[in-house]
Amino acid sequence: MKLLAQVRQALRVRHLSRRTEEAYVAWIRRFVLFHGRRHPGDMGEAEIAQYLTSLAKERGVSSSTQSQAASALMFLYKNVLRRDVGWVENVARAKAPRRLPVVLTRDEVKAILGQLRGTKRLVVMLLYGSGLRLLECLNLRVKDLDFGCGAIRVQRGKGAKDRVTMLPASIKDRLSAHLAEVRQRHERDRASGAGYVELPHALARKYPAANREWCWQYIFPAARSSKDPRTGLRYRRHLHETAVQRAVRDAVRRSGVPKHATCHTFRHSFATHLLEDGYDIRTVQELLGHRNVGTTMIYTHVLNRGGTAFAVLRILFRSSTAWRHRTLRRA
């Protein structure tokens, strides 16, 4: 088996995401080309250090990009070549500046939403109202929505973690109408012999008929179905992320909002506005799916916003104190 095929197999055995697979394979390919197509088995710590240093000095990549490249190479040597390269020394590290996230005001959110139409508008409303990442939102299936409890179940989010976040009451009617249209399209697909959807892992073998059931369909399906060369079936996948990204970029430009706003900016705005409204920071941490509360603390940059400073300070003090008391009681 060729090297990159072995890498893909090792990644899939560990159920890592498709995005991670694409990124790791790309970095390993660049590493091989950088060293004149030498096989990684003939190289070691010195060649890894040389490549990572060139990324920082010659290409000027960010710290996160260099770290991703290092993770890909460590995965290659540890899990595919079965070699322990240890800690790579003498690597010039790219600097990691601490940047605050871009956050929109409520009026700016309304202005951008006013420039969006149709499905893309509904997607962005979910990003802002639920704090979802873009791919988490597009990967939602019908069964993940709980209108009765006002909740959304996020399956295998970042880091392969499940969580529950809020379903905004303000978009329930729009979402119900959208699902009614999607269901009609699904019934037409079934009548024409299609209506299939990809299932995660081995569920297609465990439940052979589930890939045509309504509950497994994507909430935001693609406009057209595509044929899978492996099975010969026509699958309707989810809306592609680039379509939403382009729509948001155009909407920001038309709205006149003077900020570099992207789809992820609405997640930042969701967290910041919850803190402004008095939500406990631990609750915000759970809704966002952060493993460490320190990651959520970055949204406390609103402390520098005039009159909201003391209100947010009280929120943070109450939340940290209550959390400490609960921990002591459990102990």
Image: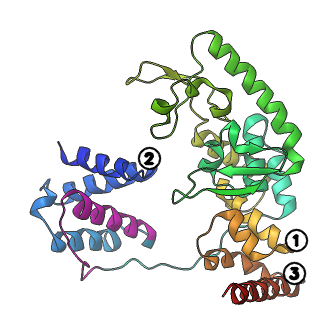
Kindly identify the amino acid type of the residue bearing the numbered disc 1: Asp
The residue mark sitting in front, 2 or 3, is 2
Q: Is there a contact, CB below 8 Å, between mark 1 and mark 3? A: no
Q: Is there a contact, CB below 8 Å, between mark 2 and mark 3? A: no
**Majority secondary structure of magenta residues:** helix
Identify residue for label 3.
Answer: 308
Question: Does residue 238 belong to the magenta stretch?
Answer: no
Answer whether residue 262 is visible to the viewer in this image.
no
Identify residue for label 2.
Answer: 18
Element at label 1: loop
Give the tally of numbered discs.
3
Element at label 2: helix
Work out whether mark 2 precedes mark 1 in sequence or the reverse, and give the earlier one: 2
Can you give x and y, in whole percent of width and height, for residue 161 in the image? 56, 58
Identify residue for label 1.
Answer: 277
Kindly identify the amino acid type of the residue bearing the numbered disc 2: Arg
Question: Does residue 75 belong to the magenta stretch?
Answer: yes
Residue at 35% x, 55% y: name it. Answer: 24
Relative to 94, say whether 18 is above or below.
above
Q: Is residue 287 left or right of residue 230?
A: right
Can you give x and y, in whole percent of width and height, for residue 32 in the image? 20, 56
Kindly identify the amino acid type of the residue bearing the numbered disc 3: Thr
Read off the magenta span.
64-91
The residue mark sitting in front, 1 or 3, is 1
Relative to 12, say whether 207 is above or below.
above
Residue at 58% x, 71% y: name it. Answer: 291
Distance between the Cα atoms at labels 2 and 1? 37 Å
Can you give x and y, in whole percent of width and height, for residue 181 in the image? 77, 25
Q: Is there a contact, CB below 8 Å, between mark 2 and mark 1? A: no
Checking the image for residue 215, the label placed there is none
Q: Which quadrant is home to the N terminus? A: top left
* Mark 3 Cα-neighbour bin, 10 Å: few <14, some 14–19, many ≥20: some
